[in-house]
Image (tube, rainbow, N blue to C red):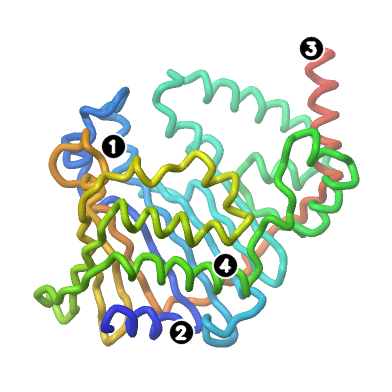
Amino acid sequence: MKVQNAFDKLSEQKSFSAELGFDGSADDIYAAMKNEDDFKRSDAEMLAGLTVKVGAASDKPLKDTKDGGSMSLALSNGKADLFELRSVDKKLYIRADLKAITALDTSSKGSGTKELDDMLKQADQLPSSLASVKNVLKGKWIEFDPKSFTEFVKESGLDKEAGLPDASATLDAKEQKKLIAAVKKALAKDATFKDAPSKDGVDHVTVTVAGRDAATDLVSALKGFPQFKDAMKDFKASDVPDKKFAIDVAIKDGMLSGISLDVAQLDKQAKGKLPLSIAIDGKADPVSAPSGATELKPQDLMSAMMFLAMGQAQA
């Protein structure tokens, strides 16, 4: 009941953020994963620095939000933001450090970086009317209306040509709540709860989940959502180890403040511990639109592609 109340209190806030990352050094990660195929020391160093941060905000309690409110997603390597997306007032804002993202792939031996450098040099030749496309490639903020892009792609037939999913496959706010309720019910059925020692004024509860049973019930819960049909078609609950997994839930002032899991429990090849943690802030700053973003229109992308293709043909 304590864990349920902690989740409920979080849903009563008007904003929250959650930051996910490995709670260990590159040495820890490499020691646990070195027996995996093609896993290198450089991979461990990359994973040790990566964090994913998500946020949500609304003008009312999150549990009562019907339009999804404002949301954000950011990927960082510990030195800089690699990618950031924000959704505010039905508009999307994106920026990406393409060079830093390309550098994450240590297997390409620099070929990916060279290709990107060539593309950026070509982009410098784009006319000023396509400044928004330049900004995309240079890691500056751009904004666009998802509805206009969806309509453009559908009208042009590119969605069928590229095999893109139908936009109706996304979950609206009502379906999101239904999904959360279904997942909570499925996981709770196969979980037990036990109080753990408090640390620095934070309560802890150990949640033990029967892995294969929980996976079976989770698959059953997701069957009611057509949006997950393709994603789940190759998943087999029998592939999940038939054992129990321990999850640590942190609760501060009655509200959920963190979740941690030793993901080495999920992998037979892993040696030692590999803790993955999610730090949760129920009083995070609201998600806001970035300043200075350049509007990107679907026609801009098409024009830029044609311009670059003509340049390559003449080269």
Q: Is residue 66 above or below residue 172?
A: below
Instruction: Provide the residue designation for mark 4.
Output: 71
Q: Are marks 2 and 1 in contact (CB under 8 Å)?
A: no
Q: Nearer the viewer, mark 2 or mark 3?
A: 2
Q: Position of residue 59 (x, y in %)?
A: 59, 85
Comes first in the chain, label 1 or label 4: 1
Q: CA distance from mark 1 to mark 4?
A: 29 Å
Q: Nearer the viewer, mark 1 or mark 3?
A: 1
- Between label 2 and label 1, give the one nearer the viewer: 2
Quadrant of the rendering where the N terminus is positioned = bottom left
Q: Nearer the viewer, mark 3 or mark 4?
A: 4
| Residue at far right of view | 155
Tag in front: 1 or 4: 4
Q: Which mark is residue 13?
A: 2
Q: Are marks 2 and 3 in contact (CB under 8 Å)?
A: no
How far apart, in angstroms, are the residues tagged by discs 1 and 3? 40 Å
Q: Measuring 49% from the left and 68% from the top, which residue is drawn there?
A: 55
Residue type at numbered disc 3:
Ala
Which mark is on residue 315? 3
Mark 1 Cα shell of 10 Å, populated few (<14), some (14-19), many (≥20): some
Quote the CA–CA distance across marks 2 and 3.
57 Å
From the viewer's perspective, tell me whether residue 24 is left or right of residue 128.
left
**Could you tell me residue 286's position as x and y percent?**
53, 76
Which element carries disc 3, helix, strand or loop? loop
Q: Quadrant of residue 46?
A: top left
**Front in this rendered view, residue 94 or 277:** 277
| Residue drawn at (50%, 83%) of the image | 14
Residue appearing at x 40%, y 78% in the figure = 282
- CA separation in Å, label 3 and label 4: 43 Å
Mark 1, residue position: 45
